[in-house]
Image (spheres, grey):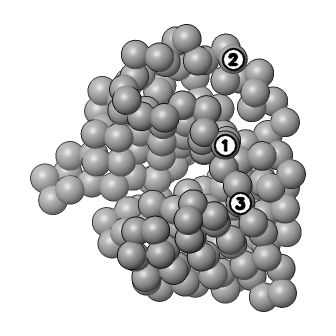
Amino acid sequence: MALKSIIYKADLSISDMDRGYYAEHSLTIARHPSETDERMMVRVLAFAIHASETLNFAKGLSDVEEPDLWQKDYTEAIQLWVEAGQPDDRRLLKACGRSEKVVVYSYSSTSDIWWKQMNSRLDRAKNLRVMNVPAETSQALTKLAQRNMQLQCTIQDAQIWLTAGEESVQVDLETFKAEG
């Protein structure tokens, strides 16, 4: 019998002063049986960074044809494709062909090694941005994971804070590859 996804709920309050975006989102997050809390929280972080009324969690690990998050316009054209982890170059190049913009949020102690292998293969992808969540930060985000979460995300001057109750994590992203 196949294992089922574990459902998490999050009430996410976002104050993104850099974009002038202030909103409340009630999220239902399906955590794949093979997914860790760390990866799930990186997905939540990515949602908070790119939040909009049209951004949605996709099937991610459950479907190789879909990202972790995506934003589509009213014609179903993909405007934003977001991946968490260390996807291979073929997957990312295919995503760059299907979407206006692709963003990867890499996390783990092996991110530097992964990026050194991928860098030259992805150089021609002009609509790709690769960000790294330092391993200490992604592990700290794990402490915020609960089946029912009340999260606040504040973004100001490219500084990101994710807070749940008394726990707060400052996220300083590293840019591996900028668009263009």
The residue type indicated by label 2 comes to Lys
**Can you give x and y, in whole percent of width and height, for residue 123 in the image?**
47, 17
Q: Nearer the viewer, residue 160 or 103?
A: 160
Which residue is label 1 attached to?
174
Marks 3,1: beta carbons within 8 A: no
Front label number (1 vs 2): 1
Q: Quadrant of residue 7?
A: bottom right
Above or below: residue 168 compared with residue 4: below
* Quarter where residue 93 is shown: top left
170 sits to left or right of 115: right
**Earlier along the polypeptide chain: callout 1 or callout 2?**
2
Cα distance between the residues tagged 1 and 2: 14 Å
Label 3 secondary element: strand
| Residue 171: mark | 3
Callout 3 crowding tier (Cα within 10 Å): few <14, some 14–19, many ≥20: many
The Cα atoms of the two marked residues, 3 and 2, are separated by 22 Å
For residue 139, say whether it is visible.
yes
Residue tagged by mark 2? 116
Residue 179 screen position, x and y as percent: 42, 34
Mark 3 to mark 1 CA distance (whole Å): 10 Å
Circle 2: element type:
helix
- Which mark sits nearer the N-terminus, 3 or 2? 2
Left or right relative to 64: residue 76: left
